[in-house]
Amino acid sequence: MKIMKRNHIIIFLLLVLTSSVLSSCDDTLKEDPVIFVNPDEFYKNESQCKAAVNYLYYPLTQFYKRELLFATDLTSDLSYFYGTNVDPVNFFGISPASPGTVAINGWTACYSGIMQANNAIKGIERSPLEDETKKELMGEAACLRGFYYYILTELFNDVPFYLDEVFTFADQDRISKLPRMSANATRDSVINDLEQYIEYLPIKLPSDASFQRASRQFAYMLIAKMAMKNYDYALAKQNLLKIRAIYGILDPNIYTIDDLWFSNKNRPESIFEVQYMYDPSGIKKASGVSYSMMPPLTTAGTDIFDGVSIPFIGKASSRSNPATPSNYFISLYDKISEELDPGLNGIDLRKKITLADGFNGVQFDRVKKGGKPYFGIKFWTPDMISTNDGNNQPVFRYADAILMLAECYNEEPNRDATQALALLQEIRERAGYVTFFIKTDKKSILKEIQEERARELFGEYQRKFDLVRWGIYYNQVKSTSGYESMTIYDNIRPYHKYLPIPDAEVIRSKGVLTNEDYQ
C-alpha cells in the first residue's frame, strides 16, 4: 500500500478536498482545497476537524466508477463485452502482473482513505472539541474507513488491516509489511468499530436531498452487508429493521421508479451515493459509466445512436463500445409474466428504464435486425460531453435493504417465508406488478431473491458481490454469459471471484503479501 513519506511527520497535501460548507445546516459536499501541514498542529478547532473528515470522501471518486462496474456487474451473469476489451477485467485476463484498473486504483484509493481516516480519528480524539461533536465526526470517519475495508474485502478477500496512525518511518515500515488478515475477521472488526459510534451519527431523512454524507442508515447498511457476508443473518436483520423503521413501506408515490435513474441525484430512496458533477467550465468529476451503457454513436457530432435520435444524450458524446445484456438477464424480465396476477398488465417498469429497444418509439438498428436491446435510460447522461458524465453512482439504496431483509427472513434458523415473500412483493408492486408465489421452500425463495436483485439492482455495483456471497459466481457466470462469449467461457476460473493484489503492492511489501490462488 502507498504511504506518504515526510521524514518523521506526514504532510497531508490534499490537492482536491471533497468538503462541505462547515455550517451544520448545510450538508452538501462541495470543493474546497485545504493543506494539512503538521498533524500535531492541526485538529485545533471544529472547522479543521471537519475538513479532515471531508477529505475522506475524495478517494471514492478515484475508483467508484466505470472500472469498478466492469468488475462487478458488466462481467457477470447479467452482462458482458463482445470480443476483448482494453481492461483485462473485461475478458478475465487478469493476473497479479496485469490485475486491471480497478485492482490498482481500488487498492490505492481505499488504503489512502483508510490511512487518512485513521489519522483523522486519532487527531479528532485529541482535539479540544466537545465529546459529542468528537463522536459524531469520528463516527463519520469510521463509516468511511469501514466502507473502504468493505470494498477491499469484496474485491480481494483477505487484506491487511490496521487502525493505527502513520507518522514515522517505523510506522510506515510496519504497516507496509502487514500480511493479509482474514476477511471475516476484518468485517467483524469493522462492525465492532462502527457499533461504538453509530448512535452519534445523524439520521438522513428521505426528503433531504441536500444531505450527502455518511448517515446512520449508511452505517446500518454497511454492518448488514458485512454481517451477511459472514452469514450472521440475525445481526444483519437487526440493522436492516432499523433502516425499515426510517423509510417505511416502499411507497411508489414517495420512492418513484424514476429514483433509479442515475441522473436523478440524491432521491428519497438513496441511502448513499458517490457525488459526481461534470461542468466543462467548473467542477470536472465523471464516472465514465454512461459511456459503456449507451448505444453506439452512429455519427460523431450528432445525437444519432445506432440509427435513432436520442436528444436526451445530446450531440457532444463520444463513440462507445457498450456492454451487452446477457440472454439470461433479458429473460428475467420476461420470466415473471408466467406468474403474474391476471388482473394487472404485467409490464415491469424497470425493464423500460434498464433495457432499451429504441427511443421515442423508434427501434435501434440492431433490434430491427433481431439483435438485443442496449442498456437504457437508467444509465444515460443528459447532454453528455465526450466520455464524461456527471451522474452520481449509487452505493446503497432502500430497495437493496428490503431485498437483504427478505433474504435474512429466509435464511435465519427460524425462517419466516411469509415475511420474506411480502418484502419481495413490495419491490414488485413498485415495479408495476403482483405475482403469486407457488413454492415457499427456502431454496425456491432464495432463487426468487437472486433473480429479483438482478432485475432491481443491475448496474449498482452489487452483482459479483452477491454471486460470490451465494457461492455460485463461477458456475453462474460460465453458464450464462460464458455461453454467449467464448472469451469468458475459456478464460474464467474459480479464483476470479476475487481480484489479485497487484504485483507492485506485493513487491512493496517485500513479499509479505501473496496471491496463492493465482499461482
Image (cartoon, rainbow, N blue to C red):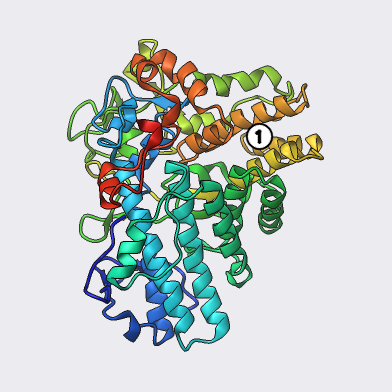
Residue situated in front as seen by the camera: 249 or 459: 459
Where does the image place residue 256, in percent across and percent down from the top left?
A: 58, 45
Residue, x 59% and y 32% (percent of image)? 470
The answer to whether residue 46 is seen in the rendering is yes
Up-down: is 58 above or below 332?
A: below
| Picture quarter with the N terminus | bottom left
Where does the image place residue 294, in percent across and percent down from the top left?
A: 34, 32
Residue, x 77% and y 22% (percent of image)? 439
Up-down: is 355 above or below 18?
A: above
The answer to whether residue 66 is seen in the rendering is no
Q: Quadrant of residue 200?
A: bottom right
Residue placed farthest to the left in the image?
300
In the image, 293: left or right of 465?
Answer: left
Where does the image place residue 318, in percent across and percent down from the top left?
A: 21, 36
Q: Residues within 10 Å of mark 1 (few under 14, many from 20)?
A: many
What type is the residue that disc 1 sits on? Arg
In the image, 356: left or right of 42?
Answer: right
Up-down: is 34 above or below 86?
A: below
Where does the image place residue 454, in percent across and percent down from the top left?
A: 54, 31
Q: Which residue is disc 1 drawn over?
A: 428
Residue, x 61% and y 69% (percent of image)? 196
